[in-house]
Each structure stands twice: as structure tokens, then as C-alpha cells.
Image: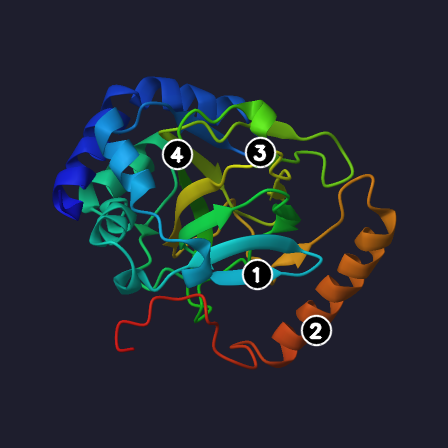
């Protein structure tokens, strides 16, 4: 199947669950989010999982902030992975997401800035953080994260679940389990602290990611911030180090709005 056919399936599923998804979105006012299970036919979701590459062929991000494998260079992998990534960028899918969330002027990201695919092995994690507020050229606001999980038989007890921190990273998180064939939508703005809990399983958690951008900020006020990480409540020393790191990164972005170097986590079609 290609991206148009898969996009049509996603659009149909979102349309069928639109009322429920809108209710979820309105219910979670602090960090708006919602999720839909059984997004695609199970056999197709299984095929997508089977198409994931070995982690050795992906980029390892390893530091105090995160530990995971990522890839945005989709032409290096099974074609089905590129088709599912860009299926979420089909016009009908964008329109249904706009109806569900009420967000304005949504645009997909053909460059997959921080999007694409990710694999989290045992012990991998993503600490609480705010996403970069803009696209790679600082022209549009990053307003929505779409996470499609494809690891079969995944339970909340396995870890590697999405965590939302409505009171900030020292509060209590809301957990959205990385259940197989589940699509999670979450707003990204100046207060949408989120993380991924450590993977407690010996299996890998596989995810397809997209961001949507907008001409408008979430809410009425303009804002700008780089990606900023914090420690978990029990990580006091790490939290101090990550606060200092976030402060330095913020200073650098003010001095060099376009960044000091081009990010490697984009789809370079002219590679």
C-alpha cells in the first residue's frame, strides 16, 4: 500500500472516532491530547512493525537527556516505512486532525524535522522536555505531535510509554501507554512537558512520528524556546545539569536564531 491508500484508512478511522477524540481533547485542558486504538488493519500494522530496520542502521541519541535510536532519512529503509510516515501528511488526515483539535492552519513537515521513526531498546528513555517551539527555519510554530505505536502485544507495564506532565516535570505525569496500533495526538506549546518512561522490556518499542506546524501559536501569545529538558522528580542532580544545559541552549538560540549548525535529524532528499 502507498501513502495515499494508508492515508485514506487513517482519515476514515479518525472520522469514525471524531466525536470521541474531540471529547478527549477538550477534557485534557492542561496538555491537550487524545488517542485512538486500532488505527489501521492489524495485518498492516504488523507489516509496518516488521519493516523497522535494525537499530544499528539508525542514529543513536545518547546523553543525559535521552537514549534512543532515530531516523528521518526514510529512503534508507523499507519503503513501507516512508509510506506510513507520509500517510499522516495526506490532506484528508490533516483536515480530520484540524477538526478534532481545533488548531489553525496546520502544515505537515516534509523534512521530518525531529520526526520519522524511533526505536527504544531496554533501558532507553526520554526525559521530561518541551519541544522546540518552531520548525527548523523558525518560520512556523510546532503545534502538534503525532505518535503511532506499532510494537505488538505492548502493555503499560513494559514501559516506554508517553508521559504528560500538566504540573511540570516535578509533578505527577499522565501516562498514555504505547499500545500496539495506537495513535496519540498531543499539543506542543510552551507548557506541554512530556517524556517517555524507561523501557522495562527486553523488546524494542517502535514508533512512527510526525509533527504539524502552524502560522499561529497555541493560544494568543507569541513565544519562542529551544528544546528544553529537565530531570525526573527523583533525578535532582540530573535536573540541575539539564536546567543549566537548557539555559545555555536558550542563550545560543537567541544569539544564533537559525542555530550554529544544521540539524542531522531531517530528511535530506538531495542526499
Pointer 1 with pointer 4, Cβ within 8 A: no
How many numbered dots are placed on residues in this image?
A: 4
Residue at left offset 34%, top offset 66%: 267
Count residues near mark 4 (Cα–Cα under 10 Å), then give few for <14, some for 14-19, many for 20+. Answer: many
Residue at left offset 18%, top offset 32%: 9
* Percent of width and height locating residue 169: 73, 41
Q: In this view, does 73 lie above or below 47?
A: below
Give the spatial CA distance, label 1 vs label 4.
31 Å
Element assignment for label 4: helix
Mark 3 or mark 1: which is in front? 3
Give the spatial CA distance, label 3 vs label 1.
19 Å
Which label belongs to residue 61?
1
Q: Residue tagged by mark 3?
A: 201
* Percent of width and height locating residue 167: 72, 34
Which label belongs to residue 251?
2
Q: Residue tagged by mark 4?
A: 101
Q: Residue furthest right?
A: 237
Closer to the N terminus: mark 4 or mark 3? 4
Closer to the N terminus: mark 3 or mark 1? 1
Please give left or right for residue 143 compared with residue 233 in the image: left
Closer to the N terminus: mark 2 or mark 4? 4
Closer to the N terminus: mark 1 or mark 2? 1
Q: In this view, does 56 lie above or below 163?
A: below
Count residues near mark 1 (Cα–Cα under 10 Å), then give few for <14, some for 14-19, many for 20+. Answer: some
* Percent of width and height locating residue 119: 47, 48
Give the spatial CA distance, label 2 vs label 4.
33 Å
Pointer 3 with pointer 1, Cβ within 8 A: no
Pointer 2 with pointer 3, Cβ within 8 A: no
Closer to the N terminus: mark 1 or mark 4? 1
From this viewpoint, is residue 132 visible?
Answer: yes
Amino acid at each position: 500500500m502507498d501513502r495515499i491508500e494508508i492515508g485514506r484508512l487513517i482519515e476514515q478511522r479518525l472520522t469514525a472516532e471524531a466525536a470521541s477524540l474531540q471529547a478527549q481533547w477538550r477534557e485534557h485542558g492542561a496538555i491537550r491530547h487524545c488517542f485512538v486504538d486500532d488505527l489501521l488493519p492489524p495485518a498492516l500494522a504488523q507489516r509496518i512493525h516488521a519493516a523497522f530496520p535494525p537499530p544499528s542502521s539508525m542514529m543513536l541519541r545518547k546523553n543525559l537527556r535521552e537514549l534512543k535510536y532515530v531516523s528521518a532519512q526514510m529512503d534508507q529503509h523499507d519503503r513501507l516505512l516512508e509510506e506510513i510516515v507520509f500517510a499522516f501528511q495526506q490532506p484528508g488526515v490533516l483536515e480530520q486532525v484540524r477538526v478534532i483539535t481545533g488548531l489553525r492552519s496546520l502544515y505537515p513537515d516534509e523534512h521530518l524535522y525531529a520526526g520519522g521513526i524511533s526505536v527504544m531498546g531496554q533501558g532507553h528513555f526520554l526525559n521530561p522536555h518541551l519541544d522546540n517551539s518552531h520548525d527548523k527555519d523558525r518560520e512556523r510554530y510546532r503545534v502538534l505531535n503525532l505518535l503511532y505505536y506499532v510494537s505488538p502485544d505492548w502493555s503499560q507495564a513494559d514501559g516506554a510509554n508517553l508521559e504528560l506532565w500538566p504540573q511540570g516535570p516535578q509533578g505527577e505525569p499522565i501516562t498514555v501507554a504505547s499500545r500496539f496500533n495506537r495513535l496519540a495526538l498531543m499539543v506542543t506549546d510552551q507548557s506541554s512537558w512530556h517524556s517517555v518512561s524507561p523501557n522495562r522490556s527486553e523488546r524494542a518499542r517502535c514508533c512512527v512520528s510526525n509533527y504539524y506546524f502552524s502560522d499561529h501559536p497555541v493560544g494568543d501569545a507569541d513565544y519562542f524556546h529551544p528544546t528544553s529538558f529537565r530531570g525526573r522528580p527523583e533525578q535532582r542532580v540530573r535536573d540541575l545539569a539539564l536546567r543549566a544545559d537548557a539555559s545555555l541552549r536558550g542563550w545560543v538560540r537567541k544569539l544564533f536564531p537559525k542555530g550554529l549548525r544544521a540539524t542531522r535529524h531531517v530528511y535530506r532528499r538531495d542526499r
